[in-house]
Image: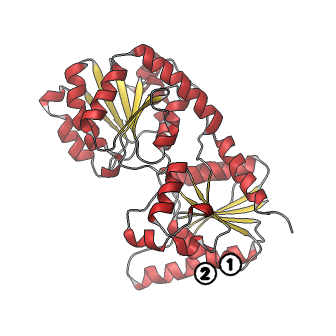
Amino acid sequence: MRILQVVGGLDVGGVQRSVALLAVGLQKAGHEVTVVNLATRDVNAEPLEAAGIPVVHLGLRTAPTPGALLATLRGLGRLWRIVLRGRWDVVQTHLFKTAVVTTPVARLTRARVVGTVHGLDPSGLQRRLAGLPARLQHRVVAVSTPLADDVARVTSIPRRLLDVVPDGVDDPGRALAPDAARAAAGLPAGTLVGCVGRLWERKGQRELVAAWRDVVARCPDARLVLVGDGPLRTELETAAADPALAGTVLLTGSRDDVGTILDGLDLVVVPSHHEGFSLATVEAMLHGLPVVATAAGGPRELVDDGATGLLVPPRDVAALAAAVVRLVEDPGLRARFGAAGLAKARERYTVEAMTRGYVELFTRLGAGRR
């Protein structure tokens, strides 16, 4: 099949990374893939280029200036020419903006048009308008069952139009033993609790640091490792400097050795207010780590409460602290949860599983039959 993927950007982020992984997976499965990026070149273009996948960067700009408007119009014209002239079997959009600017033109062709929803946008206007492009698409995909249910509840997209194809990540295997990983990544001693993600309000690190006071009061050898950067960094650094935390919180900033860091951790916390899927959860599971996550969107499906990890209500500092303490204090439970999570992730949440899910959907829609 000839497949066009349209994405709003290729910068740092779970959606952008998922699109890159899917494109590479589809190519490895024998399909011809092109990616159109509405923005400028960024970090997630690298794996696409390394795989030899054509990537077109349109450079659309949102600034309210004549130059930005002209660049946007030129970019849209280029996108529409690519869609109309490409003889695509599938045109797949990712998130609301790409669906709006791509779907009407794609429906003028013989391509099957599929839109993937990766999360619920906080904008009420976008939620109200989400059903407009969706009703022109042959199928809408959500990346988790909880997300599909939430989308049907808060938008005008009927649940019957929503399929579920979970995201997937590469299965890295454990590259290093914990002690070697800690030495390589410069991690401290103690029981290490990690949180990987952009440092911003919706990811819940503020609540995690608040909960950490109770954790270290019960488990003084525990250490919290926050991996990532973002607008909350200064606030979190100030909170971590509180004498009550006694140097038990490490903020690493953005790192390109996240896999090594995960090899050195004992458990991972995903305290997000809402996640459409949660690549961080799956990556932790694939490293054999138990997960404490908020029951907010995707993690409700990813984490089997009491079997592969623990689920707590979002924004509940006391419940978050209690769950972390439970796992810090019980190495045997961590090992059992980690092994069960690894088995589940390898079965359901790899790039290969994601690719199979989309190929089966495209085939069911009649893509490739000319």
Quadrant housing residue 109: bottom right
Residue found at the very far top of the displayed protein: 332
Mark number displayed over residue 77: 2
Q: Is residue 56 above or below residue 84?
A: above
Front one among 232 and 72: 232
Work out which quarter of the rendered image holds the C terminus and state it.
Answer: bottom right
Task: Judge left or right: residue 127 versus residue 346.
Answer: left
Front one among 113 and 319: 319
> Do the numbered discs 1 and 2 sit on residues whose CB atoms are within 8 Å?
yes
Q: Is residue 295 above or below residue 212?
A: below
Residue carrying label 1: 81
Task: Judge left or right: residue 86 versus residue 42.
Answer: right
Distance CA(mark 1)–CA(mark 2): 6 Å
Mark 1, Cα crowd under 10 Å, few <14 / some 14-19 / many 20+, is: few
- Residue at 73% from the left image edge and 51% from the top image edge: 27
- Residue at 53% from the left image edge and 82% from the top image edge: 73
Front one among 114 and 79: 114
Can residue 214 be seen in this snapshot?
A: yes
Residue found at the very far right of the displayed protein: 370
Q: Is residue 55 above or below residue 239?
A: below
Element type at mark 1: helix
Quadrant housing residue 169: top right
Quadrant housing residue 83: bottom right
Residue found at the very far bottom of the displayed protein: 66
Work out which quarter of the rendered image holds the N terminus and state it.
Answer: bottom right
Element type at mark 2: helix
Give how far across and how far down residue 69 sits, in percent. 46, 82
Question: Of the residues shown, which amino acid type is indicated by label 2?
Answer: Gly
Question: Of the residues shown, which amino acid type is indicated by label 1?
Answer: Arg
